[in-house]
Image (spheres, rainbow, N blue to C red):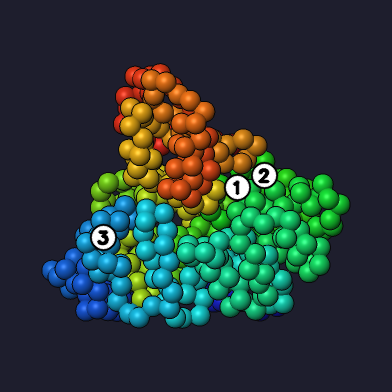
């Protein structure tokens, strides 16, 4: 793979050939899911897998949404009847939602994204996504290693130790969130640690605004994004063309009107719905991610021919990603219900110099420092993220149904 332009020949085939092949695989996946996953056995009981030969037929299958998984899994643990083969690892994501990992090499299909980001066998990658309970670290780790890269399983935090690793090992690649990469580089600058070893980065988990991308490019680092989830793995990835994200070859992606089963017109913003063709362990069919995006018409200048999407454009529900982790309205509700003093609450998610921040606004009669500290500790306990607490007068929060208000902009 040293000098080749594309990961494999699948990336440049014409779309009609691709869809013919994908729908053949889909028929096999539907047979497998129907026979081995109780949930899909019920969902697909009146559907003949051999009849699902195009997108119009696929759209007749109801969407199963990520937001449904919490209740499905509580009713039928651990995976709500959606798993269909033995797993390798079991992860917990916020919600909580449990996700299996299959036993295949590069189960999450991120090697292709690493290749498009310029990574090659022999590169050494600092991976700063978490390896603890959540699958993020493994999603990137498996793809980098499948490509032949060496991986430093750093995880998030422990910046002093990570700076030692950077100084001693001089990795030439980074993967993780862009905001943490910037923190590492700025702290290295402050300590006089050389970081010109970094030449490439594959980032995920949060937005990469143009201003932040330019900051990395000015340091000689080429940086692109991969859009992945704990359920599906890689869904789409960016290339050097930087014109939208290319849909991964293992997935059929649709954009549907939020809350419905209906695909929208090309270019219209809607919910990203994914059908995973490669996982026998977790054969997700028409899986609604809760993310918003839109199809970007035409082919990428990079030469890859698959469908492109515009990238992450917000949430179809109020579930919001902060510092690479989801925060669910149910979690905010749990914090509020933990304190009799709180009448109502709203979590405001903001960005300061491209760094995510959370502030829980709570209506209370008499706020004290002690109460604020207790609420802040409960936010950390339930959401697994730090958040400030702001007391507001009873009745002052808008009566608009919002539990999470994401005020970040990505200009």
Disc sitting over residue 194 in the figure:
none
Relative to 174, residue 268 above or below: above
Alpha-carbon neighbours of circle 1 within 10 Å: few (<14), some, or many (≥20)?
many
Q: Residue at x 41, y 70 (%)?
A: 90
Q: Residue at x 50, y 80 (%)?
A: 105
Foreground label between 3 and 2: 3
User: Mark 3 vs mark 1: which is more N-terminal?
Assistant: 3
Q: Residue at x 49, y 45 (%)?
A: 380
- State if disc 2 and disc 1 touch (CB < 8 Å): yes
User: Mark 3 vs mark 2: which is more N-terminal?
Assistant: 3
Alpha-carbon neighbours of circle 2 within 10 Å: few (<14), some, or many (≥20)?
some
If the image is split into quadrants, where does the N terminus sit?
A: bottom right
Question: Of residues 45 and 398, which is closer to you in this image?
Answer: 398
Residue identifier under label 2: 212
Q: Position of residue 244 (x, y in %)?
A: 54, 52
Residue identifier under label 3: 74
Quadrant assignment, res 288: bottom left
Q: Is residue 195 left or right of residue 51?
A: right
Quadrant assignment, res 346: top left
Cα–Cα gap, marks 1 and 2: 6 Å
Which structural element holds mark 3? helix
Cα–Cα gap, marks 3 and 1: 35 Å
Relative to 130, residue 354 above or below: above
Instruction: Please identify the residue farthest to the left as the structure is shown.
Output: 46
Residue identifier under label 1: 208
Q: Position of residue 118 (x, y in %)?
A: 68, 66
Alpha-carbon neighbours of circle 3 within 10 Å: few (<14), some, or many (≥20)?
few
């Amino acid at each position: 793979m040293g000098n080749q332009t594309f990961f494999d020949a699948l990336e440049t085939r014409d779309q009609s050939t691709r869809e013919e092949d994908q729908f053949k695989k889909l028929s096999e996946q539907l047979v497998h899911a129907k026979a081995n996953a109780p949930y899909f056995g019920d969902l697909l009981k009146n559907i003949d897998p051999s009849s699902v030969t195009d997108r119009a037929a696929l759209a007749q299958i109801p969407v199963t949404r990520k937001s449904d998984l919490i209740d499905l899994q509580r009713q039928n643990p651990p995976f709500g009847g959606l798993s269909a083969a033995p797993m390798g690892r079991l992860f917990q994501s916020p919600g909580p939602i449990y996700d299996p990992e299959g036993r295949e090499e590069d189960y999450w299909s991120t090697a292709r994204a690493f290749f498009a980001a310029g990574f090659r066998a022999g590169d050494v990658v600092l991976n700063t996504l978490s390896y603890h309970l959540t699958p993020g670290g493994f999603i990137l780790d498996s793809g980098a290693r499948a490509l032949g890269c060496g991986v430093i399983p750093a995880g998030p935090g422990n910046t002093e130790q990570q700076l030692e690793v950077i100084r001693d090992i001089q990795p030439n690649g980074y993967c993780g969130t862009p905001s943490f990469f910037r923190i590492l580089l700025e702290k290295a600058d402050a300590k006089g640690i050389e970081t010109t070893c970094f030449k490439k980065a594959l980032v995920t988990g949060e937005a990469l605004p143009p201003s932040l991308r330019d900051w990395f490019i000015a340091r000689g680092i080429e940086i692109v994004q991969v859009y992945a989830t704990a359920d599906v793995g890689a869904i789409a990835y960016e290339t050097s063309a930087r014109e939208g994200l290319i849909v991964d070859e293992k997935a059929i992606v649709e954009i549907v009107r939020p809350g419905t089963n209906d695909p929208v017109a090309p270019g219209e913003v809607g919910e990203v719905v994914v059908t995973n063709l490669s996982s026998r362990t977790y054969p997700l069919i028409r899986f609604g991610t809760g993310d918003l995006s839109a199809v970007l018409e035409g082919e990428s200048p990079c030469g890859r021919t698959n469908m492109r999407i515009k990238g992450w454009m917000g949430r179809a529900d109020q579930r919001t990603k902060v510092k690479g982790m989801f925060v669910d309205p149910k979690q905010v509700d749990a914090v509020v219900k933990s304190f009799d003093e709180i009448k109502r609450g709203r979590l405001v998610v903001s960005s300061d110099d491209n760094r995510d921040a959370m502030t829980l606004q709570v209506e209370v009669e008499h706020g004290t420092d002690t109460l604020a500290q207790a609420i802040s500790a409960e936010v950390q306990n339930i959401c697994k993220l730090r958040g400030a607490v702001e007391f507001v007068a009873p009745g002052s929060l808008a009566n608009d149904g919002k539990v999470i208000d994401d005020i970040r902009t990505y200009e």
